[in-house]
Image: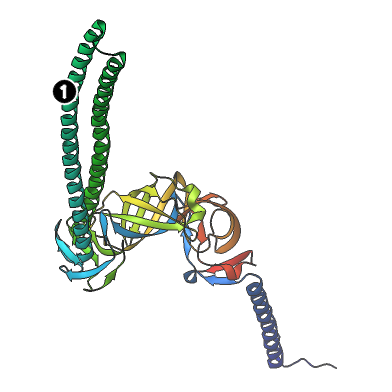
Amino acid sequence: MDQALNPDILSRRKRKTALVVAAVLATLCAAAWGINRVVSPSVDAGSVVLAEVRVGNIANTINASGIVIPVHEELVSSPIQTHVAKVHAKLGQQVKAGELLLELDNRTIVLAMDSIKEQLAQQENRILALTLELAQKRKQIVSAIELLELDLQATRVKLGRYQTLRKAGGVSAEDLLTAELNVKRTEIQLRQQHEQIDDSQRVTSSSIEGARLQKNILQKQLQQQQELLAQTQVRAPFAGMLTWLLADEGASLATGQLVAKVSELSNYKVEASLSDFHARALSAGQAVRVEQGNVRLDGVVQTILPEIQNGTVKLLVTLNQPSHPMLRNKLRVEVNIVTEQKQRTLLADYGPAFNGRGPQDIFVVRDGMARKTTLNIGASDGKAVEILSGARAGDRLIISDTTRYKDRDSIRVAQ
């Protein structure tokens, strides 16, 4: 007949069964955890950047790169082809208005002025000679007229006497006709002498007028050369800093070549550059935010330059504080041009997860799970974006780069 088992054996069997069950349960839990890790991976909250959706105001902006330039800056160029004779200033020094900076070789201008002066003297001598010639001719013609007037009086007296004698038969008809012809001939000669006075006056006056016109032309040329001569003494156009200078004595210069630049380093503006893709959205008078580090200055678009080079459009920005201590010549700044203002709208901090406007898939974190959600993104100022739909105030978004999870619909966020 059967015998009862030893209680120790029964106890060992129970313990063994419990261990087997525990091992099976542990294996099942590990498998479930592994499957869950494969299906829904997790990320550490510290390895991603989270942003909370909030209500606030935003300005839609276009970002541009800018450089600070002086409001008042003037370039001085060489008036002629020459070379630098002497340097009187140093680059970077403060100069006064009219202060001598450079001397350029002026020998060609001096020679040109001497030649013009000689031509002027020739024209003045010609005018004088023509005036004397006209006076002399007039005097000769007047003397001839006086003699002809005497001859005319004599021929008229003779004609009168012949007319009286002819009635008495004292002279022939032929003699009377000759006397009449002598009177007419003298009258014609006298008229011709008067006309010669007028003709000589017109011809000589025309020659004198031509000489005076040539003299005026030469005087203008002389004045131009005098102005060029003055420009060879390169002087500061206004008080400021000498920000560029050709300081090599003997250096050759072409006409119009830059020799100096004077800038007023107390008032500044900004020259901004951006893609011509945004050209249609730009207009004069738009508000601008200029930033450098933690400093922000406000301004407005002053001018949009019409020329587009290499796909880039440039504009000038007038600052509300043109003398701010932060501003330095050639300082690079960030320029944000405001094209639109939004009040009391949903906002989130900007990050790599956003890409322009329109519908975008963003991970929204709720209850420890980040689920891919389609958000409609609106305005952006480079620091925040407007959320038109898809999220509510208080939601948290993953705004860092999530491209490695682009094929996942959800991920767990481990705290």
| Image spot of residue 355 (x, y percent) | 54, 59
Q: Is residue 284 visible?
A: yes
| Image spot of residue 328 (x, y percent) | 26, 62
Judged left or right of residue 98, residue 389 is right
Judged left or right of residue 39, residue 328 is left
Q: Which sits in the foreground, 288 or 158?
A: 158
Q: Which sits in the foreground, 238 or 134?
A: 134
Q: Identify the residue shown where x is 61% and y is 64%.
A: 410
| Image spot of residue 249 (x, y percent) | 21, 73
Q: Identify the residue shown where x is 27% and y is 37%.
A: 203
Q: How many marks?
A: 1
- The amino acid beneath tag 1 is Leu
Q: Is residue 56 visible?
A: no
Q: Identify the residue shown where x is 24% and y is 6%.
A: 168
Q: Which sits in the foreground, 314 or 1?
A: 314
Judged left or right of residue 189, residue 307 is right
Q: Image quarter for residue 1?
A: bottom right
Tag 1, which secondary structure? helix
Q: Which sits in the foreground, 339 or 99?
A: 99
Residue denoted by label 1: 150
Question: Farthest top residue?
Answer: 168
Relative to residue 303, is residue 13 depicted above or below?
A: below
